[in-house]
Image (spheres, rainbow, N blue to C red):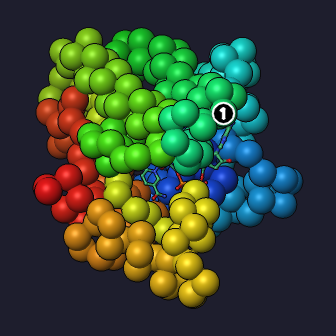
Amino acid sequence: MNDRFLEGRTALVTGSTSGIGLAIARALAAAGVRVAINGLGDAAQIDAALSSVRTAGAADARHFDADLRDPAQIAAMMQAIDAWSPLDVLVNNAGIQHTAALADMPPERWDAILAINLSSAFHTMRAALPGMATRGFGRVVNIASVHGLVASVQKAPYVAAKFGLVGMSKVAALEYAASGTRDSGGVTVNCICPGWVETPLIEPQIEARRAGGSREDGVRALLGEKQPSLRMSLPEDIAALALWLCRREAHNMTGAALPIDGAWTAQ
Ligand code: NAD
């Protein structure tokens, strides 16, 4: 399926200097897209992400700097991208985690998680969707989580943000459902809801379960709690679905929250 069906299109993947976002940027690049990457990191990490996206086949690639906690920086980033090339594909992927019981959750962690994992997607979608509707083609892929479908202890802000992202995506899917045509591909808005994926984000949770053993012991304990497949996804596994959602024939797949969770939410 590695044809260049996105040639001539432009995509933004937030939080694409690492993990799932970088894998999605690379998958879109292989389909010929012009890729705007965004995310934190020092110059070396950003250069490495850009060159990996170019090597994957991007028609062009640039880093657009914005701390997604700040709506003014998001607005400036969206304007700069629009001046570069209007957006056809928007992947809201950036996210952070902090685990603690609700009563012990620092309020500033609540604010940061809600800002990055939920509000940033509102700001980017608000800017990008009208142009997509005018052009008759647009894809919004929001990286939610299994925690947008079910809860776990010690994750109040993360679960609140991800449920919010699933809900907001359904509203946007409804509002833009009739945009474009079957031939143009329409405008769709979906969430992908991964269970455990092998990225830096979950390392503290693996570490917390090592109990003096190896990292593999920590991984086994983590998977054993909730993910019946007992195997983690790779970032590339999530990217493959994000890429498929961008195809023309996915024009009627909208408003969905798609788990990739080893049967976690089947329980
Ligand atoms: P990661 O830590 O590897 O990457 C997170 C990305 O977000 C990085 O590029 C980082 O720079 C960026 N980011 C963080 N704060 C930012 C800010 N203030 N402004 C701009 N960018 C910022 O994590 P990941 O696991 O690849 O997570 C990506 C998404 O997938 C997140 O939304 C996460 O909630 C979700 N997710 C991850 C898992 C998992 O098991 N890893 C499971 C379900 C959902």
Would you say 86 lies left or right of 254 here?
Answer: right
**Residue closer to the observer: 109 or 58:** 109
Question: How many tags in the picture?
Answer: 1
User: What residue is drawn where x is 41% and y is 37%?
Assistant: 159
Residue pointed to by mark 1:
106
**Residue closer to the observer: 55 or 228:** 228
**Residue closer to the observer: 193 or 52:** 193
The image shows residue 22 at horizontal and vertical percentages of 57, 56
Q: Secondary structure at mark 1?
A: loop
Quarter residue 40 falls in:
top right
User: Looking at the rendering, in which quadrant would you find the C terminus?
Assistant: bottom left
User: What residue is drawn where x is 29% and y is 35%?
Assistant: 190
User: Looking at the rendering, in which quadrant would you find the N terminus?
Assistant: bottom left
**Residue closer to the observer: 238 or 188:** 238
Q: Residue furthest right?
A: 43
User: Dot 1: within a 10 Å radius of its alpha carbon, few (fewer than 14), some, or many (20 or more) residues?
Assistant: few
User: What residue is drawn where x is 27% and y is 57%?
Assistant: 260
Does 37 appear above or below 137? below
Quarter residue 37 falls in:
top right
The image shows residue 115 at horizontal and vertical percentages of 59, 26
Would you say 90 lies left or right of 228 here?
Answer: right
User: What residue is drawn where x is 84% and y is 53%?
Assistant: 42
The image shows residue 138 at horizontal and vertical percentages of 36, 28
Would you say 83 lies left or right of 263 here?
Answer: right
| Residue 252 appears in the picture as rendered | yes
Would you say 64 lies left or right of 240 here?
Answer: right
Does 175 appear above or below 228? above
| Residue 57 appears in the picture as rendered | no
Amino acid type of the residue tagged 1 in the rendering: Pro
